[in-house]
Amino acid sequence: MNNINISRNNFLIDSDELNKLKKNMIETAEIIKKAVADKRFILIKHHDDTDGYTSGIVLEKAITPLIDDVRKQYYFSRSSSRYPYYDYTDSLRDLNNFLSFNSKKPLVILCDLGSNEQSLRAIRRLMEFDVEFIIVDHHKYDEENKRLTKAFLNPHTVGLDSEYNAGMIATELALFINPILRGVKHLPGLSAVADRSSGKDVDKYVKISGYSFEELERWSLVIDHETYYLRFQARSKFLDSLFFPETIDKFMKMHKDIMKEFEKVEKAVKKYAKIKDYGKFKFISINRQDVGDYEYASSKLSRVLVDSIKEPRIAFVLTPGHISYRADGVDFKGVKLIDELKQKFPHAMVNGGGHEVAGAIGFNVAANEEIMQYVDEFLNKI
């Protein structure tokens, strides 16, 4: 078994900002390596977009070579989550698997999810069975989530923002866990471009990836498309081929095919979207059912909406009891809106999360009218 002490000194890029997370990364890596040494069952649960898959897969690549047992399925697993939080139903399924495989208390690593209130119910339930949690995430967090975890790796805890996404952080963490890990330097840039992150450190990761921004953008769209239809599959040679291909030429052709799906949705958006001028920005909204059954493209409808006009805008995709939002060029604070809705309408059972400029809000269908009225008041204050 490899020594638990960490032998790595530097990040993939020079970054004063990332250095703020270095101590936390080393401590987190030591906890994970100790869990491996103690032969505890480790589960990685991650969001099912490119950023989530990147963070989960790179940690898997780092951890599994350290498991000194041919029966690795008894000590490690990874699976994706359709939701951007740790779903209670998923957590009970995971718990059932833990109790079947290993008598030692499991370690769950939540990647690109787990920071917000929606995950607390699942986390608390599993903690009753001595399950420990590590969260590797970049969304705004609740202090309770941080308090309950064994390690909490999130840029917001050190004054950074969501631009330092889960894939970037997880790749650096993976190299602290397993410094001899190779062939992963393209992953931070890939995940950052997929999540539309920006900043000088993102530019550095794109540069060392060996691909152009445009190539990474097209590649990530293909990954999102394929994993969307793959649903809840975990490890497979097919997934490896998406993230570690011999060449990305085939992705360029697939990208053209996927864009044809988007073109159909864009026509529906042009016809049925409603635009309201708030002065400083445009508010563009559409009912989800107006798009039709182009499943993948319509799942990305908020992105299609926000790309449909170029001036500062906020886009809402509406379904009964649910809002998906995305903003660009506007000081829109989606998390603040969610908090205010929870306080104003306790009967509406408001929930949600994500980033300030991209996320989701859920509520009782019966509260739809009053929720939208308050949203209008909120937007008028921007």
Image (cartoon, grey):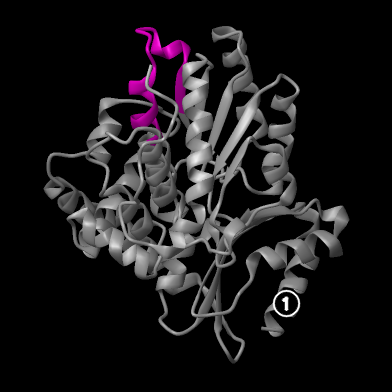
Residue pictured at 37% horizontal, 57% vertical: 192
- The amino acid marked with disc number 1 is Phe
Residue 17 to residue 374: above or below = above
Image quarter where the C terminus lies is bottom right
Residue sitting nearer the eye, 72 or 243: 72
The residues colored magenta run 59-78
Q: Quadrant of residue 127?
A: top right
Give the side of residue 77 with respect to residue 213, left or right.
Answer: right
Is 227 inside the magenta-drawn segment?
no
Q: Secondary structure at mark 1?
A: helix
Residue sitting nearer the eye, 369 or 249: 249
Q: Position of residue 373 (x, y in %)?
A: 76, 73
Q: Position of residue 35 (x, y in %)?
A: 52, 22
Q: Quadrant of residue 100?
A: top right
Residue pictured at 57% horizontal, 15% vertical: 97
Q: Residue furthest bottom?
A: 279
Q: Which residue is mark 1?
A: 378
Image quarter where the N terminus lies is top left
